Each structure stands twice: as C-alpha cells, then as structure tokens.
Image: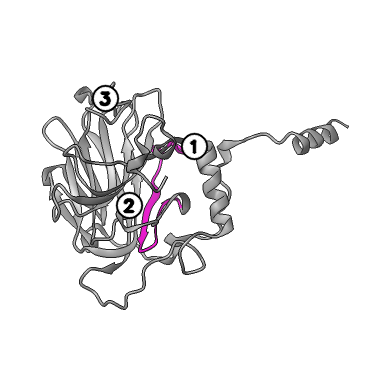
C-alpha cells in the first residue's frame, strides 16, 4: 500500500530533480567530429610562459605577472568549434577562463565576437557560464552585450566537460556536453556576426566586472589560476576555402534550428539553470537590441 501511495504522489505531484541533469537532446554534434591536438588547430597568442602542452592537451594559467591565450591557425566563415575544459576549484573571483570566436585583431574598435566565458567565483558559490554576442563593437564604450548566463547542473571543476559554439549563416547555438543551452537566430544583418572569425581561448584578470560586477576581485594569494583544455574540435568553412563549403548544422535535419527533443533539453536548462537574460533585464535599453 505504501508503494502504491508513493507512486500515486509522484505521478500526481511530480517533483523537480535537477541533480539528474537535462533530458537527452537525442542528437550529439560532437560525436560527428574528430578531435585534434592543440597544435593541429591552434597556436599561442600571448603569455607563452604560462602555457604547457602534454600530448595535445593544453594547460594555461594566470598569476600576478601574466595570463595566457591561444588563437586558431585559420579563420572561418562558419563552423562548429569545441573544446573540453576543466576549471580551477576554490577562490577564482575576478578570473575569466574563456573559449570564443572573434575578429578583434582585424577590426579593432569595430569587431564581432561570440563568447563562452566562465566567470570566476568565491569558494561558496558556483561558477557562472556567460554566453555573449557582440556585433561591431568593442570595449570602447560603444559595446552592446547580449549576455545570457547559467549556473551549470554539474561542478565544472571536477572533470572535463565539452563546450561548443556552432555558428552558421542563420544561427548561433551554444552547447554543453551536446545539450543546446542557447540559440541566437539571425533576425537581421545588424544583429548578427557575418564577418570571418578566428577561435580563441584565454585566462585573464577581469576583476573590474567578472564576479558580481567587480565586488570580488582576483586574490593572488590563490595563484596560479589554471584552465585546462583538451578534445579540441573544429569543423568549419575556412575563410580561404571553397565557396561551396557547406556550413555546419547543430541538428539532425542538416539545416537551421533544432529538433523538438533538442528544444526540450534547452528549455529544461533555461528553466532550471539560466540566471540572467539581457532581453529580460529591465535596466537595459532594448531599442539597442531589437532582436529581443
């Protein structure tokens, strides 16, 4: 009788259990793309003394003297770009560990960017994964951020997890372990990056804003701050490649959008783990973000 009552209560009053993670997306883009070693797709961009390689896996770190960053060997018109990343536990406030697309070096002050940024935190709070899209802007005061932030359904310091950006002519999709967490569709040319992009990663001090708007800053008593990357994946249309290159897709349909199962997984993540959405921020001037 007790078992029947328990089953009845579960059926009638289902409870939310976030510990099990999101529902299956049913499609796994990363499984369709082979992994490459760091040197096959990337090179050091800055802070070479804070970067080591071990069998194709990369470790970069930040201390009081410098951080470090890397850049893809090629630039792209579209593609799927991923890496497995493991973050440092403990106090990491003010520290950004990132994986992103940009053309800042080619268009300084007027660049495009598609970001995955892990915002460092204090010891008692989880990391925040920030996704962001910039179109023709920079840090010169004219930037219009399109931030959506998440607290993940796992501890990203305990193991490597796969993070990816899919960018094609119709959409940007962010994936965590093949689960889509955000889709940013192209609604018009003014709100979508269309120029060639390079792939970057870095670890750096962003104390002025990274953790609770700068409330907590990098504390170098905890240095070095370490980011670890492996399982690099690139499948893109090289900017210097043939015009016939077919853009990558994030769905089983081979076109834009996601499957209904993928949309359901994304809805679960956004319902249970999204902590900020620029479109729903009442302090923002939404005349600057017409896609909202």
Label 3, secondary structure: give it: loop
Mark number for residue 165?
none
Q: Quadrant of the N terminus?
A: top right
Label 2, secondary structure: give it: helix
73 up-or-down from 225: above or below: below
Q: Quadrant of the C terminus?
A: top left
Which is more N-terminal, label 3 or label 1? 3
Which is more N-terminal, label 3 or label 2? 2
Q: Provide the residue designation for mark 1.
A: 273
Report the Cα–Cα distance between label 1 and label 2. Answer: 25 Å
Report the Cα–Cα distance between label 2 and label 3. Answer: 28 Å
Q: Provide the residue designation for mark 2.
A: 191
Report the Cα–Cα distance between label 1 and label 3. Answer: 22 Å
Which is more N-terminal, label 2 or label 1? 2
Instruction: Report whether 152 appears left or right of 6.
Output: left
Depth check: 14 or 222 in front? 14
Q: Residue at x 81, y 36 (%)?
A: 8
Mark number for residue 214?
3
The boundaries of the magenta stretch are: 150-177
x, y (%) of residue 205? 20, 33
């Amino acid at each position: 009788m007790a078992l029947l009552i328990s089953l009845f209560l579960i059926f009638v009053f289902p409870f939310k259990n976030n510990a099990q993670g999101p529902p299956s997306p049913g499609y796994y883009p990363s499984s369709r793309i082979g992994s490459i070693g760091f040197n096959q797709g990337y090179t050091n961009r800055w802070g070479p003394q804070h970067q080591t390689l071990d069998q194709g896996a990369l470790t970069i770190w930040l201390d009081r003297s410098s951080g470090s960053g890397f850049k893809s060997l090629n630039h792209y018109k579209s593609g799927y770009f991923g890496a497995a990343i493991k973050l440092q536990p403990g106090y990491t406030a003010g520290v950004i560990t990132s994986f992103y697309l940009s053309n800042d070096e080619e268009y300084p002050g007027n660049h495009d960017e598609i970001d995955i940024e892990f915002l460092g935190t204090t010891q008692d709070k989880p990391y925040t994964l920030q996704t962001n899209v910039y179109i023709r802007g920079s840090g010169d005061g004219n930037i219009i951020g399109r931030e959506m932030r998440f607290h993940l359904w796992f501890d990203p310091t305990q193991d490597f997890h796969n993070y990816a950006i899919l960018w094609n002519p119709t959409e940007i999709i962010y994936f965590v372990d093949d689960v889509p967490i955000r889709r940013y569709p192209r609604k018009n040319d003014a709100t979508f990056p269309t120029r060639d992009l390079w792939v970057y990663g870095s670890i750096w001090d962003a104390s002025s804003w990274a953790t609770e708007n700068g409330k907590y800053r990098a504390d170098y008593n905890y240095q070095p701050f370490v980011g670890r990357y492996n399982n690099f994946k690139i499948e893109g249309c090289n900017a210097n490649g043939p015009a016939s290159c077919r853009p990558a897709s994030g769905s089983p349909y081979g076109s834009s959008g996601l499957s209904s199962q993928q949309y359901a997984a994304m809805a679960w993540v956004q319902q249970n783990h999204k902590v900020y959405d620029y479109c729903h921020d009442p302090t923002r001037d939404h005349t600057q973000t017409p896609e909202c």
